[in-house]
Image: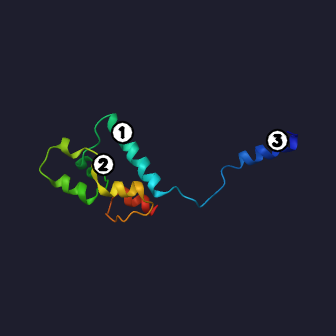
Amino acid sequence: MSGADVEKEFGLLSSGPEETSERAPSSLKARLYSTLIRQQQESGPLASLDESVTSGRAICVFEKLVQIAPVGEKAKSPFFCQVCHARVLAEHLDHPPIFWRHCPYVAFKNS
């Protein structure tokens, strides 16, 4: 490789990544999110729904039902999305027909 070619290659590398308007598919984002949460569960229990709300996080309608239920804190800390149909749809469709407020999988569809 000649000196000019090396300079050109270094110039391309130093200019940074090319800007593109292409985004990751929402189904990929959903699968990554589910995997990250499962890995987080392996290291210990997730924060309870009450703790999440107290820290300013919004929760979906199904989590809200569990939060207001008269059950112990331990019952309020699993990954509820694991059994939700919205997760299944979001992981398999790029434009899933889900519209729940504060659902992370709906947020992936809209991003």
The circle on residue 22 is none
Quadrant of the rendered structure where residue 3 is? top right
Give the SS element for disc 1: helix
Determine the residue located farthest toward the front in the rendered image. Answer: 92
Determine the residue located farthest toward the top in the rendered image. Answer: 43
Measured in 3D between alpha carbons, the distance from the residue under mark 2 to the one under mark 3, in whole angstroms, is 51 Å
Residue 6 lies, in percent from the top left, at: 82, 41
Residue at figure coordinates x 19%, y 57% from the top left: 65
Q: In front of the other: label 2 or label 3?
A: 2
Measured in 3D between alpha carbons, the distance from the residue under mark 1 to the one under mark 2, in whole angstroms, is 13 Å
Q: Contact (CB < 8 A) between labels 1 and 2?
A: no
Residue at figure coordinates x 35%, y 54% from the top left: 88
Q: Quick one: 71 or 38, which is closer to the camera?
A: 38
Residue 99 lies, in percent from the top left, at: 34, 66
Q: In front of the other: label 1 or label 2?
A: 2
Of the image marks 1 and 3, the number of the one nearer the N terminus:
3
Quadrant of the rendered structure where residue 94 is? bottom left
| Residue at the disc numbered 1 | 40
Q: Disc 1 residue type?
A: Gln
Q: Disc 2 residue type?
A: Gln
Give the SS element for disc 2: helix
Q: Disc 3 residue type?
A: Val
Is residue 95 rendered to the left or right of residue 83? right
| Residue at the disc numbered 2 | 82
Determine the residue located farthest toward the left in the rendered image. Answer: 70
Q: Which colouring convention does the figure follow?
A: rainbow
Q: Quick one: 102 or 35, which is closer to the camera?
A: 35
Measured in 3D between alpha carbons, the distance from the residue under mark 1 to the one under mark 3, in whole angstroms, is 44 Å
Near mark 1 (Cα within 10 A), the count class, few <14, some 14-19 or many ≥20, is: few
| Residue at the disc numbered 3 | 6
Give the SS element for disc 3: helix
Near mark 3 (Cα within 10 A), the count class, few <14, some 14-19 or many ≥20, is: few
